[in-house]
Amino acid sequence: MGNCYIQNGDTILFQGDSITDCGQREAQDNMGGGYVAMIAGILAARYPDLKVKIINRGMGGDRSVELLNRWQEDCISLKPDLLSIKIGVNDVWRKTGQWNEQQYVPLAEYKVNLTSLVDQALASGIKRVVLVSPTTIEQDNNGELNQILTTYADFAQQLAVERGLIFADVRSLLMRARAERPEIVWTGDGCHPTTAGHALIAEAWLKAVGA
């Protein structure tokens, strides 16, 4: 596989919100119906001799707060070789109103939470971490919430550089695709990707890890 961050025998853990979750608890293989399942399928098709275990622990509705609260059980204790984190959309989306008593997470708090997630993972011995940029919230790329989310995605990239992590900038790709190919429905509600949107995320993730 050349210069690839995925190695034979790896356990790969995907963490995040509903975009990662995508019904994983109801799916027969627990992969869900989104980019995680696509990545698992593409890896199997491209590299039939590669033996990896893929775990999807995305949880719909999670902000960085909820992810941090379940980090020991749903990440550290699983001892993944490669960890992928995609979180931040709900932190900003709650600015439009509470959901399940969740409130908006300001950028300063998001920075603390994401840094803690990464540092705990690294301290536990997880050596390969992929930070995936939070994607979009509303259909308008220039909308207020999307502009706010840009600052969260920028920090994720900054943290990846500072900690020597892999960064998958799926946000920029998705926003460009929505601008250049508006006839394709990339996100059904501005936030949750369609099949095309998930495929874009999957391809960007695989490229980031060299697969």
Image: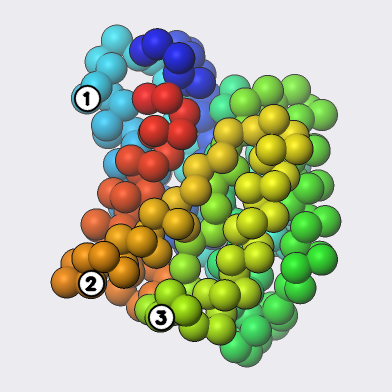
Of the residues under marks 3 and 1, which one precedes in the sequence?
1
Q: What element carries label 3?
A: loop
Of the residues under marks 2 and 3, which one precedes in the sequence?
3
Residue at image location 56% in from the left, 80% down from the top: 145
Q: How crowded is mark 1: few (under 14 residues within 10 Å), some or many (20 or more)?
A: few
Q: Position of residue 46 (x, y in %)?
A: 24, 22
Q: Position of residue 207 (x, y in %)?
A: 39, 33
Identify which residue, 140 or 203, lies in the foreground: 140
Q: Is residue 31 visible?
A: no
Badge nearest the viewer, 3 or 1: 3
Q: Residue 45 carries which label?
A: 1
Give above or below for 97 relative to 131. Answer: below
Residue at image location 60% in from the left, 58% down from the top: 153
Q: Residues within 10 Å of mark 3 (few under 14, many from 20)?
A: some
Give above or below for 211 relative to 32. Answer: above
Q: Position of residue 200 (x, y in %)?
A: 32, 50
Residue at image location 53% in from the left, 74% down from the top: 146
Mark 1: which amino acid? Ala
The quadrant in which the N terminus is found is top left
Q: Is mark 1 on a helix, strand or loop?
A: helix
Residue under circle 2? 182
Whether pointer 3 and pointer 1 mark residues with C-beta atoms closer than 8 Å, the reply is no
Identify which residue, 169 or 32, lies in the foreground: 169
